[in-house]
Structures are given as structure tokens and as C-alpha cells.
Amino acid sequence: GQQVMQIPQYQHVQEGEDFTTYCNSSTTLSNIQWYKQRPGGHPVFLIQLVKSGEVKKQKRLTFQFGEAKKNSSLHITATQTTDVGTYFCAGRGTGFQKLVFGTGTRLLVSP
Amino acid sequence: GAVVSQHPSRVICKSGTSVKIECRSLDFQATTMFWYRQFPKQSLMLMATSNEGSKATYEQGVEKDKFLINHASLTLSTLTVTSAHPEDSSFYICSASIPGSTDTQYFGPGTRLTVL
């Protein structure tokens, strides 16, 4: 079945440093979504990418969808302590209804 | 924005008892809701897709007789964990999509189940 892996599993950065998490799917995706889950909380939708090669920005966050629509990345510029949490990508395969969540990247930011 | 609530937020029960978790869409009607399970520091695993007025669609490996899902109205889906055992202890999260929009999923706050 469809698998979605993320690397790294965990990253600890100093406030102000940049951070990137990579998402790779075993199959071609129709779209990719990104969610953030704070410790003890629930996933919150951040963004959806649909087009091949698409790049979207939200303030310090930059999201990219690969040309082959099998991978994606989330880059955070100048991290802040409020960025702490686990970032999940979630992909929907072509022809499938199910949204498959990635393994997640846990980000810790030290002041 | 779309709001999804879950009740209870936390429940502790004895082994062998059944626990019902409610998921409600507060400001929109959801023809489809999803139930996920999340173990500590792990990803979300889809358990089943709940369809209003019809039977739920369960993912492979999920026992439908153990995890009973009922979607009786457009704003309410329930998950009942029957004859709970300690290995059922987990974080259960529901989500819903707004019909006709992008397939963004709005998640409830989750229910932490602990079975003693």
C-alpha cells in the first residue's frame, strides 16, 4: 500500500536557525497536505499543494511539491519557540480516497 | 472556520468495559468523518471512514466488531470501543471535511483513552 515517509524523525534547533522536513511517497500523489500538531494537541491544517512543482509561502514557512508529485518539503526560516511541534505531511494518491499521513518530524526549538 | 469537537477529552476505564467517543461538527454538516488512532510519538493511523446513513468503511486490520462506528446524523459520529483492553489505550482523533470544498480535514481535539 501507499507509504509516506518523513525525514528527519526529530530535529532540535536553536531559535533563529532554519529547519526543513522532507516527505516522500511511495506512489504519485494527487495532492499533499501539511499539518502541525503541538505537544498534547491535535493536528491543525497548514496548507495543501496540488500542482507539480508548486511552491507556497506562509510567512516564515515555505512549502514545495515535487515535480514528480511524489515528494514535498516544508522549510521554516528563522525558527521560533512557537514552531515547536510535530509536522506531518499527508498525501492522497491518485484514484484513492484515503489520506495517508507521513511518519512526522518532531521539531524542538531552544531559546 | 470549521470546528470539530470530541467528547470526552480523556477517559479511564476498566478492562472489559465499553467506551463511547463522540465526534461533532459544530458549524458545518459532515457527510463523511474519519477516525484515527495515534500512539505516543507516532503518526496518525486511519481506522475507518464514517459515512452518514450507511456502514463505516474500515481499514485493513481494524476489527469492526471491536470498534463500532455510528454516523447517525450529519453532525455526529460515534466510536465505541467494545470490551476494551489495555492495548486499546491510545489517542483517538476524529476529523471531518467540509462537503464540496477542498479536502482539508478538520480535526477534533482528540480523546485519550486509558484502559486499566
Image: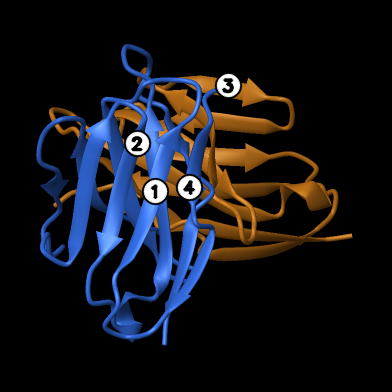
Chain colours: A orange, B blue
- Please give the residue where the numbered disc 4 appears in the rendered image: B6
Disc 4 vs disc 2: Cβ atoms closer than 8 Å? no
Q: Within 10 Å of the Cα at label 1, are there few (<14), some (14-19), or many (20+) other Cα atoms?
A: many
Q: Name the secondary structure under disc 3.
A: loop
Chain assignment, label 3: B
Circles 3 and 4 on the same subunit: yes
- Please give the residue where the numbered disc 3 appears in the rendered image: B1
Residue B4 place in picture, x, y as percent: 49, 36
Please state, as top left, top right, bottom left or bottom right, where the C terminus of chain A lies in the image: bottom right
Circles 1 and 4 on the same subunit: yes
Q: Within 10 Å of the Cα at label 4, are there few (<14), some (14-19), or many (20+) other Cα atoms?
A: many
Based on the displayed image, in which of its 4 quarters is residue B89 positioned? bottom left
Of the numbered discs 3 and 4, the one sitting upstream in the chain is 3
Camera-side mark, 2 or 3? 2
The answer to whether residue A86 is above or below residue B97 is below
- Who's the residue at 47% across and 56% down the image? A104
Residue B73 place in picture, x, y as percent: 27, 30
Q: Name the secondary structure under disc 1.
A: strand
Disc 1 vs disc 4: Cβ atoms closer than 8 Å? yes
- Who's the residue at 16% across and 62% down the image? B62
Does residue A40 appear left or right of residue B7 in this picture?
right
- Please give the residue where the numbered disc 1 appears in the rendered image: B22
- Who's the residue at 84% across and 54% down the image? A15
Circles 2 and 3 on the same subunit: yes
Circles 3 and 1 on the same subunit: yes
The answer to whether residue B51 is above or below residue B34 is above
Disc 2 vs disc 3: Cβ atoms closer than 8 Å? no
- Please give the residue where the numbered disc 2 appears in the rendered image: B76
The amino acid type found where label 1 is placed reads Glu
The amino acid type found where label 3 is placed reads Gly
Camera-side mark, 3 or 1? 1
